[in-house]
Image (tube, grey):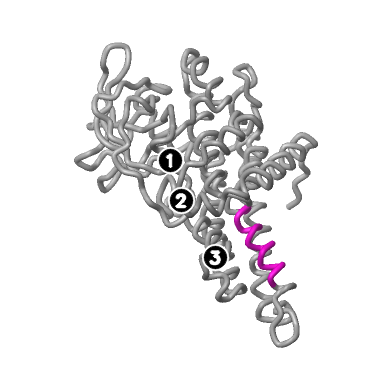
Amino acid sequence: MNFELTKEQQMIKKSASDFAVSVLEPIAYEDDRSGEFPAAAIKKMAEHDFLGMTVPEEFGGLGSDFVSVALVTEALAKENAAAAAIAVTHVVLAAQTIAKYGSDDQKKKWLPLMKSGEALGGYGFAEPGAGLGSGAEKLTAVKSGDGYELNGKKTYVANGGAAQIYVVIAQTDEEAGPKGFSAFLVEGTAVKATKSIDKLGLRAFPTAELEFAGAKAELLGTENQGAQIAAEIQARADIAYAAMAAGISEKMLDASTNHCKTRVQFGAPVGRLQAVQWLLAEIASSVHMIKMAAYGSAACVDQGGDYFLEAAYTKMYAMKAGVDAGMNAVQIHGGVGYSREGKIERYFRDIRGTFLVENANEFPQKVIAGALLK
């Protein structure tokens, strides 16, 4: 499959790559060690319009196509995966959702602020219980005046504790089962971050448990439309996460190729060994196929197609191929690949967590099997 990028897409990809190399890569190592939110870098990201990609032009954004979103995500993730995850949450899970389902007043209030970086977007779906709407601390919503009041908790909230505005899914009708959920906008000042989650990878990407105690909220879309909205935005996010996996995998490929050429053992580069060549070829194949899957799924979004199944195929392949690429990269580098002093182990940790952000790894299997057996 061959994708002919438009001149605009080529330009934005190069712009993102140049930005990532000069701004994001130099801070990636220390941010991973400290786990601190890269506020200065995110501000610069906004100055380069990367936070306004899904904000319509009428609100000051770029109104970019989703292929461009994937290209930028890939470029950012290649140099700093945590920063890319912050951007995906803001651009895809939050801003794009508000742009599609928000009221005119909600769009006018939040989208310009999100484009400028004054308001960072977050997303909350998972709950401390066994499943959405099933635990003792489930997030529930009841009407209160002109809006709603939310009580309960969300865990693994993307950009949790750092965002100024959150998109969350809460139960509005317990008797309706899976159809009894709605999507809401909640300001960061209305919630309390009770626990910051210390992760294996993507460590500078803030992930937290949030407590909602009578939090004021505004409805997104219509009541009990939450399951549909969540499925849509998470499918798009999975495509963006695949683009992240492509970027991280390509970084591992570059490092592994260089290692094969420069690491000398017994008087010759290790790349002369057939076993090493095979591992390198497997990484290259993974990178190529993850890219093709991500670009193809993103194009399906742009074309108005049914991208749910495409996103499921893409996620299922990319999450396995990305981890396999990481394993092969560590193997090629030997002890250096396992050392915290090198970069390969960070790339491997980051790519392992890429698809654990919003929903279970088993999610694509359910979508694919359901499509086959309907």
Q: Earlier in the sequence, mark 3 or mark 2?
A: 2
* Left or right: 93 as drawn, with respect to 157: right
Residue 80 x/y as whole percent:
58, 49
> Can the viewer see residue 196?
yes
- Compared with 334, 53 (above or below) is above
Task: Please tell me how many numbered marks the rendered image carries.
Answer: 3
The residue labelled by disc 3 is 341
- At label 3, the amino acid type is Glu
**Residue 33 placement (x, y as % from top left):** 48, 54
Q: For the view shown, which residue lies furthest in the right direction?
A: 7
How far apart, in angstroms, are the residues tagged by discs 3 and 2?
15 Å
Callout 2, which amino acid? Ser
Q: What is the three-letter code of the residue carrying label 1?
A: Ala
Which residue is at 59% across, 65% downward? 325
Residue plotted at (41% across, 53% down) = 199
Chain-order first, disc 3 or disc 1? 1
Magenta segment boundaries in residue numbering: 246-259
Residue 225, percent from left and from top: 39, 28
Q: Is residue 253 magenta?
A: yes
Could you tell me which residue is drawn at 67 percent across and 70 percent down? Answer: 280
User: Is residue 19 magenta-colored?
Assistant: no
Q: Position of residue 239 (x, y in %)?
A: 56, 45
The crowding category of the residue bearing disc 1, from other C-alpha atoms within 10 Å (few below 14, some 14 to 19, many at least 20), is: many
Which numbered mark, 2 or 1, is in the foreground of this view?
2
Residue behind mark 1: 158
Image mark for residue 34:
2
